[in-house]
Amino acid sequence: MKKILAVVIGMIMLMSLAVLPGCNLGRAKPISLASCETVVLGKYHDIDLEWIVLRTNEQGEKLLLSKYVIDARLYNEIEPGDPGRDNQSWGTSTLRGWLNTDFIENSFDEFEKKGIIQSYEANGNNKKFHTKGGDNTYDNVFVLSIDEAEAYFASDEDRKAKPLEDPAFYDELWVDEDGYCSWWLRSPGCEAGCGANVRSNGFVYLRGDDRNIYRLGVRPAMWVSFGRIDSAIMNESLHAKYEKEQSERIAAERTVEVDLSLIRFVNGQTAYFGNYGGEKLVWRILDKQDDKVLLVTESIVYSSAYDFSEKDMTWEKCSLRKWLNNSFLNEAFSQEEKKMILMTEITNSGNKDKKVPGGNNTEDKVFLLSLDEAETYFHGDSSRQTAAIPYAKKGNVLYVDENGYSLWWLRTPGATGAAACYVDHLGRIQTGGMMNRFDYIGVRPAIWVALKESK
């Protein structure tokens, strides 16, 4: 079964890589500057960045190239006599490092960054001099290759570019009498120490210039999903609305009266409370403190991603938290039952083994157990093994082993912020976690319920 699960996860990861945009030029259509689409995105030195749309794929993602040369930089900042001069490539260049760190960090706001897509870039050899291009790379921002510079433009004239600012602003940037300048390509020139480039007249210069001596122009390129940017802005707005509604609930529900007849306890270990998926919800009693009791569902009630993005995520902002405290809460409990569920301050500790922070504490009515709680409240792996209600298995999304057990999420982050801890089908706590976006993992909601009527 371990092997089967590993194969399934591996296939999912391969599928996720397969949809990465990249430099397949099979459908490239040369563009003309006179009629091409342009967009504005980000700022450099407080100047709006204008981009040429080189291509739009079937998913609506756009390959952008800066309309202007934004800076003048060495391709690789190493000393002229450095022995590494003859082993340079795009993968090891300081230009690549700068574009994917300082440039992207300082030129785009948090919403725009969410729209920039990591792409798979083929670093082919120089077709004339046969100089090796080095390993292929995954980049958020890059510069064009020789093949791309030739395929995406209708003519030399369309490849010509001027600097974004006054030429005097740039260190050592040469500009011709018409204001145009040369700009780097990521492909090698006649040898590894040289880099191909586009000359000021738009000609693709295959022989190239010394990568660590000449400061040529930089025209960043990147794949962007404007749909992701719109979604990020919308999600932030919804999150702010959700937090406001949560605060209002806290103030209103601290004074309500509760009807204790709505919950039924059996043998001091089990409780029946609420309905979901067409059946009465059965809860395991984990803890009792004064006038309240901590419950977790005896079974998995749903399968879902922890969060549908591929970015680092915390419990505070994940989509599963929103679903539990809105859709699930409203579907599983009546208005009177909801009055019994306490708004609770949730401590979101980080993953102590992996040293990943857990984010801000939250106030929730419904939540997932943390890694620490899963260790404290259960005695042995077998007590954590969990099956699912029939409703959770609909659509065959939930992973179920041959004995009927499934995986279930914890709210604590895993080995990275893009993963969350979970309990596997054998009841073992997996601190390394699973990718947040995997939706075949089960959900066991937890709640604190009042045992005494409010005065």
Image (cartoon, rainbow, N blue to C red):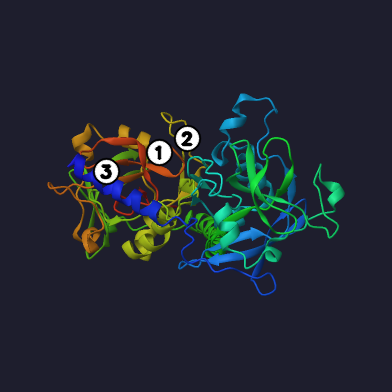
User: What quarter of the picture does the N terminus occupy?
Assistant: top left
Q: Nearer the viewer, residue 178 or 41?
A: 178
Quadrant in the rendering for residue 62: bottom right
Q: Earlier in the sequence, mark 2 or mark 1?
A: 2
- Give yes or no for contact between labels 1 and 3 (Cβ–Cβ under 8 Å): no
Q: Residue furthest bottom?
A: 35
Residue 388, horizontal then vertical, whole percent: 21, 53
Residue 311, horizontal then vertical, whole percent: 49, 49
Which residue is the site of mark 2?
356
**Image: 102 above or below 180:** above
Q: Amino acid at mark 2?
A: Val
Q: Nearer the viewer, residue 28 or 246?
A: 28
Q: Is residue 372 visible?
A: yes
Which residue is the site of mark 1?
414
Residue found 23% across the figure and 32% down from its top: 379
Q: Amino acid at mark 3?
A: Ile
Which residue is the site of mark 3?
285
Q: Residues within 10 Å of mark 3 (few under 14, many from 20)?
A: many
Q: Amino acid at mark 1?
A: Gly
Q: Residue furthest front?
A: 128
